[in-house]
Amino acid sequence: MRYLIVFLVSTRALDASYAQSSTCFTDWSAAAAVVKSEELVTLDQLTKLAPVKFGGEIVRSALCESEKGHVYRLTIRDSDGRLKSIVVDAKHPF
């Protein structure tokens, strides 16, 4: 339980600082249209490659638009159950 509390606190800080520089989609049907029109990597593709590329499974995701383009904000759970937050380019995440 201690890990979860630490994660929630750190995620809130990350969300607050990141929200200032980007806009995230809250509706995945709207995000799907952006993924298609911008030719972004799909969340399904990220999910399949997450264990190899990110060292765990995706447990939370958001597609966001920043000054530099679209990014995915991901929460990854590793094989030990630890959570980490990463931000990857939505067009070239690997």
Image (spheres, grey):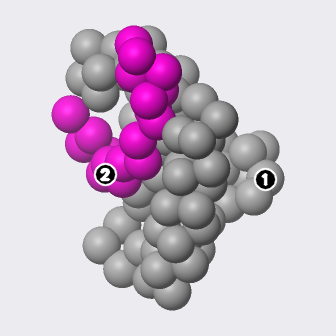
Question: Could you tell me how far apart the alpha carbons at marks 2 and 1 are, in whole angstroms?
Answer: 19 Å
Quadrant of residue 67 within the rendered picture: bottom left
Q: In front here: 49 or 38?
A: 49
State the residue at coordinates (77%, 44%): 29
Q: Mark 1 packing: few (<14 Cα in 10 Å), some, or many (20+)?
A: few
Residue at disc 2, secondary structure: strand
Three-letter amino acid code of the residue under disc 1 = Asp
Residue at disc 1, secondary structure: loop
Residue range corresponding to the magenta coloring? 76-94
Residue 6, image x, y percentages:
53, 52
State the residue at coordinates (48%, 68%): 14
Residue 38, image x, y percentages:
45, 52
- Residue 52 shown left or right of residue 74 in the figure: left
- Residue 29 shown left or right of residue 56 in the figure: right
Residue 25, image x, y percentages:
67, 60
User: Residue 88, labelled with which disc?
Assistant: none
- Residue 22 shown left or right of residue 92 in the figure: right
Quadrant of residue 82 within the rendered picture: top left
Q: Mark 2 packing: few (<14 Cα in 10 Å), some, or many (20+)?
A: some
Pick out the residue farthest to the front.
Answer: 2
Pick out the residue farthest to the bottom.
Answer: 20
Q: Is residue 40 above or below residue 65?
A: above
Q: In front here: 92 or 59?
A: 59
State the residue at coordinates (59%, 30%): 59
Which residue position holds label 1?
27
- Residue 62 shown left or right of residue 14 in the figure: right
Quadrant where the N terminus lies? top right
Which residue position holds label 2?
89
Would residue 20 be counted in the magenta stretch? no
Three-letter amino acid code of the residue under disc 2 = Asp
